[in-house]
Amino acid sequence: MMRFADIPRKLRRWRRDERGTATVEFAIMFPIFVTLFLSAVELGMISFRHSMLERGLDMAVRDIRLGTGEEPSHDEIKQAICDFAGVLPSCTDNLRLEMILVDPRNYTPPQAEADCIDHSEEVTPLRSFVHGRSNQMMLMRACYVFSPVIPTAGLGYHLNKDGAGNAAMFATSAFVQEPRG
């Protein structure tokens, strides 16, 4: 039977006991490190895909700019971007383009929200895809939707997603239509 006088002594012994302290530190720090690791993986994939989207758009715009007077269609430009980008999963299904005429002397910014594909909604027609005339400045915006690598943890959880659980990335390029004929 424990006596009342033994309680303070047992409490002092319990307070000085350091067994299990590493377990407490591990239990606190492990979720933080796992979240940081998963976020780093997600950020790496997003950065890689975005740089490839930028590259694909730049190379396709370069081909348009240096073209010999032909006007490629929306689908041809989309295919060129996907071919140049190379590593974007389901690129042609997840990419939407806008080509907007820009007047450099009387600049009005395009709509802030770019067109994107939302696989959870009905298919919508293109908002704007107009080929400019000779010496006109054009702005091309590309929106690519992707599903996060790890959608339930870290950065993948905090991305803005559409109804289908896809996030979006954007690339923009401007060019001047070369004189034709």
Image: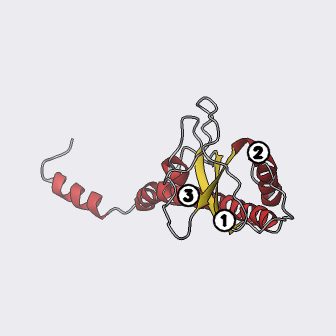
Q: Quadrant of the C terminus?
A: bottom right
Q: Are marks 3 and 2 in contact (CB under 8 Å)?
A: no
State left or right for residue 8 relative to residue 116: left
For the point 62% across and 41% down, the residue is: 117
Please rate how many residues cluster around mark 3, counting C-alpha atoms within 10 Å: few if below 14, some from 14 to 19, many from 20. many
The residue that disc 1 covers is: 136
Which quarter of the figure has residue 50? Answer: bottom right
The residue that disc 3 covers is: 39
State left or right for residue 155 relative to residue 95: left
- Name the residue type under label 2: Thr
Q: Secondary structure at mark 1?
A: loop
For the point 50% across and 47% down, the residue is: 160
Instruction: Give x and y (percent) for residue 145.
Output: 64, 47
Label 3 to label 2, Cα distance in Å?
27 Å
- Name the residue type under label 1: Gln
Q: Secondary structure at mark 2?
A: helix
Q: Nearer the viewer, residue 13 or 72?
A: 72
Checking the image for residue 1, the label placed there is none
The residue that disc 2 covers is: 92
Please rate how many residues cluster around mark 1, counting C-alpha atoms within 10 Å: few if below 14, some from 14 to 19, many from 20. some
For the point 61% across and 48% down, the residue is: 150
Instruction: Give x and y (percent) for residue 67.
Output: 84, 64
Instruction: Give x and y (percent) for residue 63.
Output: 81, 64
Q: Nearer the viewer, residue 125 or 69?
A: 69
